[in-house]
DNA sequence: TTGTATGCGTTATCAG
DNA sequence: CTGATAACGCATACAA
């Protein structure tokens, strides 16, 4: 009579000659436990290859051992980077990763997410930008009693619920790089209105220009929406300026690719006639011609940090300090000194 | 005394004046049910906004209402496309999506997956290429009693467990396109050994060349591993051939990007001096300069079909026919007639 | 430090 | 057709 199914806590208890509760204590690392019995139980657990049934635990604890990833981010590489970072931490735990993309345009979105959270009762949820900037969503999680961590381009929640990069400062550096190369007429392709990342990156540009005493006006800031096409349109506008800018900072790589496209259509050489810097360091950046100088931010590292906060293994965050994750400028071939 | 938590099956039973089991029958669409009682129970369910607790169902049924996505695919866009396709179908159901990336290089992989499946007991699993080609993995799922669907470049399982594209035929068309444009010296950058997709695509090339009566030899087929760098290396080799090929078919876009890179480094104009066709139609294809002619295959459509097979809503598959998903050649600017 | 009784929300068994 | 009762596997209160 071989047992076809998985061993349960009862099997362990019986073989170890203890009660279920004692086994339960061992599993949950209760500190009021005789070392001997703990060893004995652990021995049996190892022999049996016993693993607690997550569904049963979820039922008893009214809490599912999953982390939910809620996002509306169109950048596949970012989303997958986050998934990998999260799973790297979750891999050695009892947690699994549930993905739940949402549609920001849907008026029912919050209600839909509420139902999702009430049904699944995830242990924690990870909020990706741009939806992570939605305070109503954060409030919803809080009201349901679901812990969450938000990811963003700047801190907009308390440290234990936030992993943030420092886009503004990073862009200041990037613009500084252009200025050092001799550029004075530097334009920017901005991100969509209402996106914190767009705001931060544009602010970084403005601060850098002001700090260097360089003049600029509204026409130097072309609106974009993070898409390739919008990057092309913005670049058309910028290259129609006279005098023509010698450098463009694009708020993401996708739009930078559009900028390169337009420049090439106009017969401009990059970087000889126009320097370009992007943001994100998606794969396209290195595959473009010329390879794009861009800003790389530590997606997976941030996701790992977020996972640790979610499952509560993080230490040292209690002091209320925001740990900003620093980005780096990846220098490739799309920047040179202005030719004139 | 308001109930803070969700209504349960007991609440429904009490208010409807029936037993739990009857409510359960309603939920599970049992056919042995009086229409009146069914209506009454459904009424109460609607009033209460009751939803069955998935954790409790999972425990009782020994089966979790989730679909697991197991993959080792490095292409973020593909993986996310599949996730979206899957979720489009799952959205209106009780199912959730669990993601479980694996590492093909890990000798413990199968054991790890087995533990995952035994713990989570997913309702079904979706296997992405290239790991989907692993028959041991499929066997493992089967032995555990977990239904699965494999995704691939050609059928290698029974229809109800397979969604397949038709890479070979698609590549034949692509090569035909080059031949029609006047190319005779067409080389190919192959995918990694042991990958079914690589084999299918290479076979498509060979078949097309033979069908057109065009000679080719081993040196025209350069090995690659689907990475940008390998695409560069392969192209170096191919462009060292004399006479030089006038066209290159790359087994994926990433390597095609590498090919464009190398061509450009050598001062070759595309498509004037060299025509290039890729495969996958990832975003990079349209963002490259020149925009890449490539093959687009219906990832999301295939994922939707897979989801339907997994949750058993599919009809008409019982006849044992493989429904192949057709890819289309996206004609952009990287192909022209040979200049000489 | 350990064990007993009970509950978590659902489904299955087997009577009525 | 319907309902009482027992699983499902684990955790918590309360004793011992």
Image: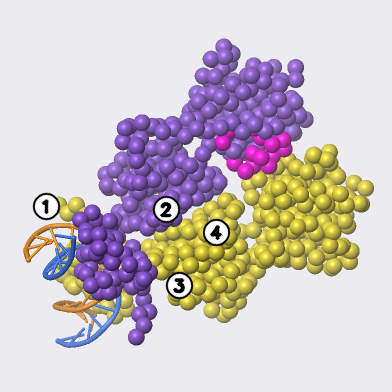
Chain colours: A purple, B yellow, C blue, D orange
Q: Does residue A77 show up magenta in the picture?
A: no
* Residue B303 rendering spot, x and y as whole percentages: 54, 61
Above or below, comparing residue B25 to residue A34 in the picture:
below
Would you name the residue on which mark 1 appears?
Answer: B1
Asked if labels 3 and 2 share a chain, the reply is no
Q: Residues within 10 Å of mark 3 (few under 14, many from 20)?
A: some
Chain letter of the residue beneath label 1 in the structure image: B
Which residue occupies the extreme front position in the image?
A: A36
* Residue A201 rendering spot, x and y as whole percentages: 52, 28
Above or below, comparing residue B185 to residue A10 in the picture:
above
Classify mark 2: helix, strand or loop. Answer: helix
Q: Residues within 10 Å of mark 1 (few under 14, many from 20)?
A: few
Residue shown at the point (44%, 55%) measured from the top left = A91
Q: CA distance from mark 3 to mark 1?
A: 44 Å
Would you name the residue on which mark 4 appears?
Answer: B103
Classify mark 3: helix, strand or loop. Answer: loop
Asked if labels 1 and 2 share a chain, the reply is no
Which numbered circle lies on residue B146? 3
* Tags 3 and 1 touching, CB below 8 Å: no
Going from N to C along the chain, the mark reached first, 4 or 1, is 1
Magenta residues span A282-296
Residue shown at the point (51%, 55%) measured from the top left = B84
Residue shown at the point (82%, 56%) measured from the top left = B187
Residue shown at the point (55%, 61%) measured from the top left = B106
Going from N to C along the chain, the mark reached first, 3 or 1, is 1
Above or below, comparing residue A99 to residue A325 in the picture:
below
Would you name the residue on which mark 2 appears?
Answer: A90
Name the quarter where the N terminus of chain A is drawn.
bottom left
* In this rendering, the label closer to the viewer, 3 or 2: 2
Q: CA distance from mark 3 to mark 2?
A: 23 Å
- Residue B127 in sight: yes
């Amino acid at each position: 009579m071989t047992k076809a199914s998985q061993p349960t806590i009862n099997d362990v208890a019986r073989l170890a000659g203890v009660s279920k509760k004692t086994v339960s204590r061992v599993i949950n690392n209760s500190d009021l436990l005789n070392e001997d019995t703990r060893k004995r139980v652990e021995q049996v657990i190892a022999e049996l290859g016993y693993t607690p049934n997550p569904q049963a635990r979820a039922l008893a604890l009214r809490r599912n051992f999953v982390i939910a990833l809620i996002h509306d981010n169109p950048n596949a590489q970012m989303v997958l980077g986050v998934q990998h970072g999260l799973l790297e931490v979750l891999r050695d735990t009892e947690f699994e990763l549930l993905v739940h993309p949402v549609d920001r345009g849907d008026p029912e979105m919050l209600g839909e997410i509420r139902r999702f959270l009430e049904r699944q009762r995830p242990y924690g949820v990870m909020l990706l930008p741009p939806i992570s900037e939605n305070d109503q969503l954060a409030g919803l999680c809080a009201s349901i009693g679901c812990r969450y961590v938000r990811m963003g381009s700047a801190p907009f929640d308390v440290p234990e619920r936030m992993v943030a990069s420092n886009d503004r400062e990073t862009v200041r550096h990037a613009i500084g790089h252009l200025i050092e190369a001799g550029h004075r007429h530097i334009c920017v392709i901005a991100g969509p209105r209402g996106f914190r990342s767009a705001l931060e990156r544009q602010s970084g540009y403005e601060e850098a220009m002001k700090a260097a005493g360089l003049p600029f006006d509204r026409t130097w800031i072309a609106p974009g929406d993070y898409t390739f096409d919008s990057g092309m349109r913005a670049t058309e506008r910028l290259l129609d300026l006279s005098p023509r800018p010698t450098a463009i900072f694009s708020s993401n790589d996708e739009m930078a690719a559009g900028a390169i496209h337009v420049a090439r259509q106009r017969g401009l050489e990059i970087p000889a006639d126009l320097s370009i810097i992007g943001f994100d360091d998606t794969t396209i950046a290195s595959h473009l011609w010329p390879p794009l100088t861009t800003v790389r931010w530590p997606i997976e590292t941030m996701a790992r940090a977020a996972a640790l906060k979610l499952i509560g293994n993080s230490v040292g965050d209690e002091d209320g300090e925001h740990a900003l994750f620093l980005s780096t400028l990846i220098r490739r071939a799309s920047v040179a000194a202005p030719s004139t």
